[in-house]
Image (cartoon, rainbow, N blue to C red):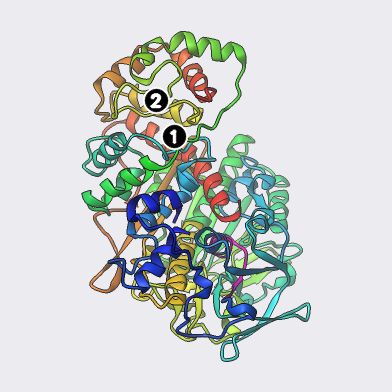
Amino acid sequence: MSFNRRDFIKTVGASSVIVPITACAAPSGGRGAGGKARIVVIGGGFGGATAAKYFKIVDPGLDVTLVERQQTYTSCPLSNEVLSGHGKIEDLQSGYDGLKKRGVNVIFDDAVSIDPAKKTVKLKGGKTLNYDYMVLSPGIDFNFSGVEGYSEALANSTHPHAWKAGPQTLALKKQLEGMKDGQTFVIAVPPGPFRCPPGPYERASQVASYFKSHGMMKSKVLIADANDSFSKKGLFEQAWKRHYPGMIEWVAGAAGGKVVKFDAKSNTASSDFNDFKGDVVNIIPPHHAGNIAKSTGLTNDKGWCTVDMLTMESTVHKDIYVVGDSTVHGELPVYGAPKSAHMAATQAKVAVGAIIAKMSGLAAPEPFFVNTCYSVAEKDWGFSVAHVYRKRDGKLVYITDAGGISPVNMDDEVQLVLQRKLESEYVHGWFKNIMADAFA
Amino acid sequence: MKSTLMMVLAAAGLAATPALAGPTEDLASTCNACHGLNGVSVGPTMPSIGGLPEIYLKNVMLQWKNGERYSATMGRHFKGYSDEEISSLATYFSKLPWVPVVQKADAKVIAQGKEASERCETCHGATGSEPDDDETPKINGQWAEYMHLEMLKYRTDAVKMPHRKMRGNTKKLDEADVEAVAKFYAAQPK
């Protein structure tokens, strides 16, 4: 969607008919003062920020308001590398000046309720916003009751989940740094779908990397998993065997890995069958779509927002387009449609295209979805999963000929080392670009 | 604005497709996440692609798709697109301006790189901005880290890289000069 007027004139040969979108007849929805469609974006993560920016790229005259709680965004991607000391949290942060410069009206406030009938949003600060079209990108919220004995209070004090990057990431890092050789770091993984499918296993790798680089070879990472398999499993297991032999243990759900209870005093996470006692215990609680999506009635019985994948419009309320981690993808399998930054950004672009088409009374354009999700298991040892989705017979499908994970085995060691080295470097270039694509 | 015009024309029945700016532009927007807006990368390990020669872009993308050129990631993406879509992407990105991202480096390193870049000059031009033909990319102001990694691929016999000249010449570089050559070209504004 990088438009260039000169190219357009060259290709189409027309030049003088410039009518802003905002003056086009609207097939639905009310209008603000001056007949301008009002677009409100809730949530300034990868999904929301990308959406706000791309509206402005397509038509700088659009009236776009972004509502976000925090003045500084901290990226979850690469935050596991902050734990191990391989990355710095400052490098994962961005403010919203880039979007403001593009003319996005950024409001730092908390959206407390949406009225989909009246098309209004109430903010905690007292303001009410009217919208004609909304992009809702609320991310996730946690179901703390999913693990008995765990709570938001514990998360904010002694037992950070660090599944939203920020102060909790630094708190968990400090706990890791306080560990002694021979001690155990427990990670409890919630039932899927959860944010960042390979995240817990990357975290285990980064913790082990910390142990290794600090000579703590007797320390262990124990992953107590509610699930029976995981994203990039072959790649992670290969990395663990090579870089951290005997240091990382994975307990599958079927083997009693599903943590349902936590005792903070004894630092013990328990499933129905096992007790996992750790020196640091990192509970990642089960989660669901952001609370605002739930309270607006946009979620299904499992707590996720269902959308029309060709447009990202909610299947519950029209003119609300939901993007990012809070969505589920119809019949696509969980790992075929991961909750990643790249997916959120790609969905945001699809939503922008669909909304602008609708504003102009046109059919939604063909959506293009791609995803690249890198994981870094150790220095110079990165790998990825890629996804390409296309519209086929009126439905969005995962193209099985394309995408997939990095090769696990290669013909020889030289190839393998090169492949892992390249992707361990590419992740950082990807990160800078995707941050800029959303926030700059 | 292009989209605005397109939509107005479409609404008036003047344009054939009801797409926004067109499917190629929409598809190209998915490249931005890694290669930057308008194909100008801001991430040192990812190349800028806007303004590179059409034939070069098309060749590389098709070679990845067909498994004729090693890539760590890109081949997996291009298997999802038709040859026609790939051609359109090449045309689209080739028409964008080439925006060199000039990177500073130690003067000594740049001098060392210039000295060692003699064998690159015939095809890429003295500063990398005037390639000899349409199959050769501009490399002035390309990201040094990306070029360094790319040369690592050419220097590794175990992976398939189709360009014999490029393979031969990068392999002739002294190990110590590879990074310097990358930094020399990265520092060139034009």
In the image, residue A7 sits, relative to residue B175, either above or below, namely below
Q: Identify which residue, A158 or A93, lies in the foreground.
A: A93
Question: Residue B98, located in which quarter of the rendered image?
Answer: top left
Q: Which residue is mark 2?
A: B152
Q: Secondary structure at mark 2?
A: helix
Image location (x, y in percent) of residue B71: 33, 38
In magenta stretch: residue A245: no
Question: Residue A91, located in which quarter of the rendered image?
Answer: top right
Q: Secondary structure at mark 1?
A: helix
Label placed on residue A5? none
Q: How many marks?
A: 2
In the image, residue A318 sits, relative to residue B184, either above or below, namely below
Q: Residue furthest top?
A: B115
In magenta stretch: residue A41: yes
Q: Do we see residue B50 in this rendering? A: yes
Give the residue type at disc 1.
Lys
Q: Are marks 2 and 1 in contact (CB under 8 Å)?
A: yes
Q: Is residue B130 left or right of residue A61?
A: left
Which numbered disc, 2 or 1, marks the residue closer to the eye?
Answer: 2
Segment colored magenta: A38-51
In the image, residue A44 sits, relative to residue B107, either above or below, namely below
Image location (x, y in percent) of residue B32: 46, 50
Q: Which residue is mark 1?
A: A421
Give me the C-alpha separation between circle 2 and circle 1: 10 Å
Residue drawn at (37%, 53%) of the image: A386
Residue drawn at (67%, 57%) of the image: A73
Q: Quadrant of the N terminus of chain A?
A: bottom left
Residues tagged by mark 2 and mark 1 found on one chain of the structure: no
Q: Pointer 2: residues within 10 angstroms few (<14), some, or many (20+)?
A: some
In the image, residue A87 sits, relative to residue A264, either above or below, namely above
